């Protein structure tokens, strides 16, 4: 590793640790000393759950009261049953006063039992100083005001201590007649639930407190619930966090002591069972956690994640080894590129560490099944795709030079006596005869001393399609031979294998050309000299296209194709791992026969053959120079079918060759070659997962709208990286096109839209490819009549349906949760961004339906 690499590694590690330290920096606020006036007391332990009949033991209650003794003056209970009727007796032992409560709801029989038990406590224990009959019963709608008044009167008639009921502040304003029935006003003011930012919360609380006092002059007002959660989801501008909880409570306690406010803090201990009724935030209002550890000090700085040094070290360790490998092996990358890749790698490692641990540490993660089987693996896969993309982006943007850079040989230097004979194979199926004849004409003009042309038409049923080509070939002499195979197995590979059997024995090189290509005369002379190296199995030139200039749709897909050949193939060539694609390719006949010919069980026989060559120990040559141009598909459906075939074929190859692609598998494939093949297919696999997540997001949104008690918004820790990935991929696409593909900004954007529009069809192909063995060969249609406008919609009806479902889901979520709910806005944004590939498909399909201004093709040359 160069010294500069050591500097980069050291710098990135320091910056990463500094970022962790900054995010978890200590926060200072108002210090407070003294005894808390009162605190809500629910002694449920970590595994208790009153909804499932699991209650704390008397020992648990006594231990918790002992812990609070000296720290608080009074404890508030919410029920007079289920063992909590023992609290006054136990609290008396530790000098604690009790604000006793009776729970009132829709269960009339239980309400009677609550009232009887509450009255008994008051009569038996002098440390019960006040009473609360019902907790937010009106707020929940469990009872009416007259019903609640009757309960209050019954208790007042039988006890001599002050009696009230506890409701949010607005309920007292709404029902002023309630104040006449109580001895004091018991209000709940919880700024978090009203979406007030923590910075404004204390002022807001005091404002509401004064408002209630002014509404009921002469009545004592006690704030019987005041607090802030330490963890959970943001609500409006209110963010739950340990730091915010500490700063809020310390500031409030100081103000309350200075202004003589009567209060009760919610609450003593975290209550994990409340996850069932108030989601993650409901469990985290305690000043002590569920293990009875004090969560924050009342003086001095507060740190949000105390474990952050361990997490930072773990993230650094995850990113360290890949960085060392990269900086050691890629010294030819310019300094800016090494810094960029190092920063992205360390950021990815930190994001994975953060997303996998913070929700667990802060105890607001979803269930472990969802967390560890879907979210974390999905996040890791997502970031792995990003790192692969970043690796390619870095190499192509910042490489000082390419190790494997091949140029066309000078055709004027080629000596006729040493040039090998070439057999050119032109397979076709149901192709327009005029187009095929034009391709034959271009081949006849090749400047090469010794070649033959074999046209193989397989499985075309209409004689009007293949017979004109046969007749035309008959006029061209012995150099051109035509074969019609009425019923021939093996797809395109079957036709090519037949051609191989008919090849002149003197031919050493096989050339394959698609039926729509017009080739340059110097193609063979420029590339066949590379076969002087006996280890070279094939020489590949890029595909290119013509006659797109007057058609927006064809222009878009032309430049989308160009990206692969001028970006992806250049990157793969550095590792001798190019994709063999079945046109403009020259193949050593001996290698083809040695490797078992064309694979008739594969729909992408060309790519599979290239991998077999490399597995056998041969090499490839990629010359990034255009020697021929073909036609793009005429319709969006044709474009989709072609990409479906490629993606399906990739899955076939992966299933057929996965053993040789394993990192530890022995053989001729280098690690770099294995990496490039898997990395090249991984984005398609990611598209398959994208479709799964699309379906899941729609169903989840349905749950958010129809069953909010059982569905909560996905964590921001998982949603935000999803948004980042979309915009990052778009940005790197545009930058690479700017540096590697010679086209305008508009054409760059068009290529991005066209490529994005294939997401759904690729996903379908991946799913089908994983779970099925074979599909019929689908030719890519050329020179088709333009579809009508409505056909443009039908060409992307599935994508349009998915986009509409996601837009509807986003609108429904915002309508139900409000435009000021941060989680709702974030989730709606995720849904909208997820719909972009489907919208791109609709746009591309509609543009494909616009009538072309393309001039008519010329007639083929006359013999």
Image (cartoon, helix red, strand yellow):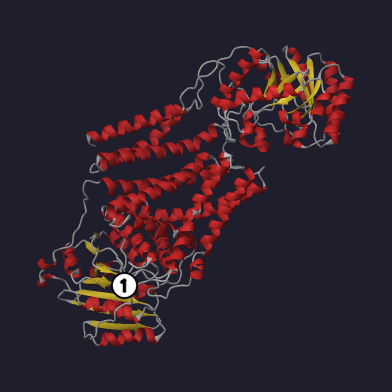
What residue does disc 1 label? 514
Q: Is residue 551 above or below residue 478?
A: above
The x, y position of residue 422, in whole percent, is 20, 73
State left or right for residue 506 relative to residue 205: left
Split into 4 quadrants, where in the image is the N terminus?
A: top left
Q: How many marks?
A: 1
Closer to us: 270 or 176? 176
Determine crowd level at label 1: few under 14, some 14-19, many 20+ residues with C-alpha closer than 10 A: some
Quarter holding residue 605: bottom left
The x, y position of residue 163, in whole percent, is 81, 21
Q: Secondary structure at mark 1?
A: loop
Q: Is residue 505 visible?
A: no
Q: Is residue 505 above or below residue 642?
A: below
The x, y position of residue 481, in whole percent, is 26, 83
Closer to us: 557 or 401? 557
Q: Is residue 722 visible?
A: yes
State left or right for residue 346 relative to residue 704: left
Q: Is residue 328 above or below residue 832?
A: above
Split into 4 quadrants, where in the image is the C terminus?
A: bottom left
State left or right for residue 377 relative to residue 319: right
State left or right for residue 361 relative to residue 588: right
Closer to us: 579 or 562? 562
Residue that appears at 41% across and 57% down: 753
The x, y position of residue 549, in whole percent, is 32, 66
Residue that appears at 26% across and 52% down: 574
């Amino acid at each position: 590793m160069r010294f500069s690499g050591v500097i980069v590694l050291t710098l990135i590690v320091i910056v990463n640790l500094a970022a962790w330290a900054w995010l978890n920096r200590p926060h200072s606020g108002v210090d407070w000393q003294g005894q808390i006036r009162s605190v809500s007391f629910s002694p449920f332990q970590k595994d208790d759950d009153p909804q499932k009949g699991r209650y704390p033991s008397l020992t648990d209650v006594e231990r918790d009261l002992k812990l609070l003794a000296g720290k608080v003056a009074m404890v508030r209970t919410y029920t007079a049953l289920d063992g909590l009727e023992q609290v006054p007796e136990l609290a008396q032992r530790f000098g604690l006063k009790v604000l006793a409560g009776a729970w009132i709801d829709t269960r009339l029989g239980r309400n009677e039992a609550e009232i009887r038990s509450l009255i008994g406590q008051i009569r038996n224990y002098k440390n019960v100083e006040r009473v609360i009959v019902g907790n937010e019963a009106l707020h929940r709608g469990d009872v009416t005001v007259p019903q609640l008044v009757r309960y209050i009167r019954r208790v007042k008639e039988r006890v001599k201590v002050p009696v009230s009921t506890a409701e949010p502040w607005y309920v007292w304003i709404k029902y002023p007649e309630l104040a006449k029935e109580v001895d004091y006003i018991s209000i709940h003011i919880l700024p978090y639930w009203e979406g007030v930012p923590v910075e404004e919360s204390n002022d807001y609380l005091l404002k509401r407190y004064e408002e209630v006092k002014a509404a009921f002059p002469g009545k004592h007002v006690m704030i019987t619930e005041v607090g802030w959660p330490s963890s959970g989801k943001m609500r409006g501008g209110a963010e739950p966090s340990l730091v915010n909880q500490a700063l809020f409570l310390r500031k409030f306690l100081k103000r309350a002591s200075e202004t003589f406010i009567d209060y009760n803090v919610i609450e003593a201990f975290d209550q994990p069972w409340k996850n069932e009724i108030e989601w993650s935030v409901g469990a985290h209002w305690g000043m002590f956690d569920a293990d009875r550890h004090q969560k924050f000090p009342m003086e001095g700085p507060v740190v949000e994640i105390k474990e952050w040094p361990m997490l930072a070290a773990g993230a650094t360790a995850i990113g360290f080894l890949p960085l060392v490998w990269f900086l050691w092996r890629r010294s030819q990358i310019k300094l800016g590129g090494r810094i960029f890749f190092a920063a992205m790698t360390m950021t990815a490692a930190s994001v994975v560490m953060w997303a996998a641990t913070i929700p667990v540490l802060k105890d607001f993660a979803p269930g472990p099944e969802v967390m560890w089987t879907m979210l974390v693996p999905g996040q890791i896969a997502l970031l792995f795709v990003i790192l692969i993309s970043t690796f390619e982006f870095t190499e192509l943007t910042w490489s000082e030079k390419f190790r494997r850079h091949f140029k066309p040989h000078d055709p004027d230097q080629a000596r006729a006596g040493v040039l090998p004979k070439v057999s050119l194979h032109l397979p076709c199926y149901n192709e327009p005869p005029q187009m095929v004849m034009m391709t034959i004409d271009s081949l006849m003009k090749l400047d090469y001393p010794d070649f033959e042309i074999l046209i193989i038409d397989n499985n075309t049923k209409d004689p009007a399609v293949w017979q004109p080509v046969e007749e035309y070939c008959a006029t061209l002499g012995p150099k051109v031979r035509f074969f019609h195979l009425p019923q021939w197995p093996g797809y395109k590979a079957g036709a090519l294998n037949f051609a191989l059997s008919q090849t002149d024995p003197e031919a050493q090189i096989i050339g394959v050309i698609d039926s729509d290509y017009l080739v340059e005369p110097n193609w063979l002379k420029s590339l066949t000299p590379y076969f002087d190296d006996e280890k070279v199995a094939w020489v590949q030139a890029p595909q290119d296209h013509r006659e797109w200039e007057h058609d927006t749709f064809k222009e878009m897909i032309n430049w989308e194709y160009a990206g692969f050949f001028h970006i992806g193939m250049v990157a793969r060539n550095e590792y001798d791992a190019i994709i063999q694609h079945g046109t403009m390719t020259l193949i050593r006949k001996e290698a083809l026969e040695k490797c078992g010919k064309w694979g008739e069980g594969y729909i992408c026989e060309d790519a599979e053959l290239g991998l077999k060559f490399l597995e056998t120990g041969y090499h490839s040559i990629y010359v990034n120079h255009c020697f021929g141009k073909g036609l793009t598909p005429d319709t969006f459906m044709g474009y989709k079918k072609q990409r479906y075939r490629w993606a399906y074929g990739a899955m076939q190859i992966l299933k057929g060759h996965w053993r040789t692609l394993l990192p530890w598998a022995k053989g001729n494939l280098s690690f770099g070659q294995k990496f490039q093949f898997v990395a090249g297919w991984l984005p398609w696999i990611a598209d398959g997962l994208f479709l799964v997540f699309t379906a899941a997001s729609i169903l989840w949104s349905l749950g958010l709208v129809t069953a909010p008690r059982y569905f909560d918004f996905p964590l921001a820790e998982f949603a935000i990286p999803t948004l980042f990935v979309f915009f990052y991929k778009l940005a790197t696409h545009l930058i690479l096109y700017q540096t590697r593909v010679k086209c305008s900004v508009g054409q760059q954007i068009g290529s991005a839209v066209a490529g994005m529009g294939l997401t759904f069809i690729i996903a379908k192909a991946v799913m089908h490819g994983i779970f099925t063995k074979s599909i019929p060969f689908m030719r890519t249609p050329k020179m088709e009549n333009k579809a009508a406008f409505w056909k443009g919609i039908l060409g992307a009806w599935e994508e349009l349906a998915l986009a509409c479902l996601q837009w509807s889901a986003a609108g429904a979520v915002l309508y139900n949760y409000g435009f000021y709910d941060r989680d709702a806005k974030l989730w709606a944004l995720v849904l909208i961004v997820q719909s972009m590939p489907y919208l791109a498909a609709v746009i591309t399909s509609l543009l494909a339906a616009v009538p072309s201004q393309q001039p008519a093709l010329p007639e083929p040359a006359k013999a």
